[in-house]
Image (spheres, rainbow, N blue to C red):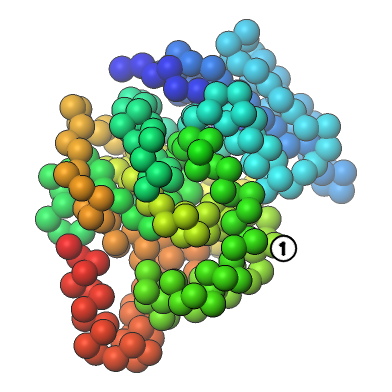
Amino acid sequence: MTSSVPVVLIVFNRPDLTAQTLARILEVSTGPILVVGDGPRSHVVDDDRRVQETHEVVRQLGGARVVLDGAPENLGLRRNYVRAVDRLMGEHGRGIILEDDTLPHPSFFPYVAELLVRYAEDERIGSICGQRVPPAPGLEAHSYGFCHIPPPWGWATWARAWKDHARALEAWPALKASGHLEVLLGAAAAREWSALLDHAETTDSYWIRWVLAHWVTHRLAAVPHVNLIENVGFDERGTFTQAGSRYAERGSEPARSLAFPLAHPPHLAVRYASAEDDIAEAALPFSTRRRRLKQLLLEGPRRFWVRQRRQSR
């Protein structure tokens, strides 16, 4: 199956990974393909050469099908990422966002294409994600479910949702004071996310703001029952996936095929609440077991078990 959904591939200085992921996109996608590359760092030896090699790979593989937009100077991960998605949304109003190390399964593309149409006007949905999170028991009958935290590796969205990314931090103080995160995630997890969001302005990550944009607007992310994105970038060249990082320690599930026709959930309450634990395990400092123990102590047994039953529905 092919897909005509516009795609942006965000690259930097890893020509081998860029070649692998771009080849997969060209294999399946018939739509517009934009490659956005960050510029070299002046203080890093050979960065300019590796950036140019990456651009040359794009030119050779993509030819006239691919538009290459390379930054003349180094912007950093977040700024380059944001300009890439800004351009994709500005030109097409929707699309798929991949990084050089996020290798999609071919079935990722028709899955995204169908859901982008299905939820195009549904303001309750903010993103369509390809990274699998463990489904709660009893939800395996559906091709995908929903969670409050969009997994970061391989996703799609609409301009209507992406516009809230830029102003998410402005709304953070009010959201923090409202107690909404305690209701949404529980007291322990809310404390950890709050500490992360308090320093989001100085963190070189688009994703923290993107998660916050979902919370501020009360939107959900669609997440698949099987993993459709394999991260192949666990080496010293990664920003958050370098050796020794929490992401590298956990690794990535291999991507595999999603069956069609899709089995759509009957309602948005088909929630993969375990996604919050799975993503937090990699992104936050405490383990899920320790977080649940803290939650139990902070909330008390009755409130804790009410939350657990609600999240497992």
Q: Residue furthest top?
A: 64
- Say left or right for 170 vs 307: right
Query: Which amino acid, mark 1?
Result: Thr
Percent x, y of residue 272 = 27, 56
Percent x, y of residue 275 = 34, 59
Q: Which of 65 and 57 is in front in this view?
A: 65
Report if residue 101 is visible in the image.
no
Percent x, y of residue 60 = 64, 13
- Say left or right for 55 vs 212: right
Report if residue 74 is visible in the image.
yes
- Say left or right for 209 vs 264: right
The residue under the point 58% across, 43% down is 163
Q: Which of 171 and 39 is in front in this view?
A: 171
The residue under the point 59% across, 66% down is 172
Reply above or below: 202 against 96: below
* The C terminus: image quadrant: bottom left
The residue under the point 48% across, 16% down is 31
Q: Residue furthest right?
A: 42
Percent x, y of residue 12 = 68, 36
Q: Nearer the viewer, residue 95 or 141?
A: 95
Does dot 1 land on a helix, a strand or a loop? helix
Label 1 belongs to which residue?
202
Q: In which quarter of the view is residue 310 placed?
A: bottom left
- Say left or right for 23 vs 300: right
Neighbour class for label 1 at 10 Å: few (<14), some, many (≥20)? few
The residue under the point 43% across, 72% down is 180
* The N terminus: image quadrant: top left
Q: In which quarter of the view is residue 80 placed?
A: top right
